[in-house]
Amino acid sequence: MSEKSDLFHCDEKMLTYDAAVVLEKFVDGLRQRKLAATTEDGPVCIDLPLLTQLEISFKQKVKPGKSKRKLSIELAWKEEETAGE
């Protein structure tokens, strides 16, 4: 039976500039193949493999008088794929 858990989750409103700063920290971590974040339960550090699956989508929902846009970035890998590095 599989088990899921959130190691880190960020869902907050912030200035676009501040969001860029957060994303830059993740980009730096990607370059080093090590992601780090601080949660309420303490720090979380994840080692990354050489190869990952990257998915980027930009969506738009238009209604009369307003629209909503969403950028999603997903990086995924399976642990068994990283064992052969």
Image (spheres, rainbow, N blue to C red):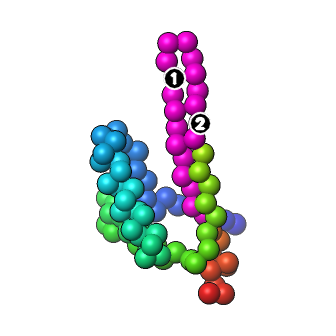
- Disc 2 target residue: 59
> Can residue 11 be seen?
yes
Q: Is residue 73 magenta?
A: yes
Q: Quadrant of the N terminus?
A: bottom right
35 in relation to 80, above or below:
above
- Disc 1 target residue: 67
Image x and y of residue 53, in percent: 64, 64
Q: Nearer the N terminus, badge 2 or badge 1?
A: 2
Judge by depth and name the residue closer to the eye, 17 or 4: 17
Give the residue drawn at x 51%, y 28%: 68
Q: Is 60 displayed left or right of 43 in the figure?
A: right
Q: Is 38 displayed left or right of 70 in the figure?
A: left
CA gap, disc 2 to disc 1? 11 Å
Give the residue drawn at x 57%, y 55%: 74
Give the residue drawn at x 39%, y 56%: 23
Which residue occupies the extreme bottom position in the image?
Answer: 84
> Under tag 1, what secondary structure?
strand
Say which amino acid is labelled 1: Ser
Say which amino acid is labelled 2: Lys
Q: Which residues are magenta?
A: 58-76
Q: Residues within 10 Å of mark 1 (few under 14, many from 20)?
A: few
> Can residue 44 be seen?
no
Give the residue drawn at x 58%, y 31%: 60
Image x and y of residue 30, in percent: 46, 69
Q: Quadrant of the C terminus?
A: bottom right
43 in relation to 65, above or below:
below
Q: Residues within 10 Å of mark 2 (few under 14, many from 20)?
A: few
> Under tag 2, what secondary structure?
strand
- Principal SS element in the magenta part? strand
Image x and y of residue 27, in percent: 42, 64
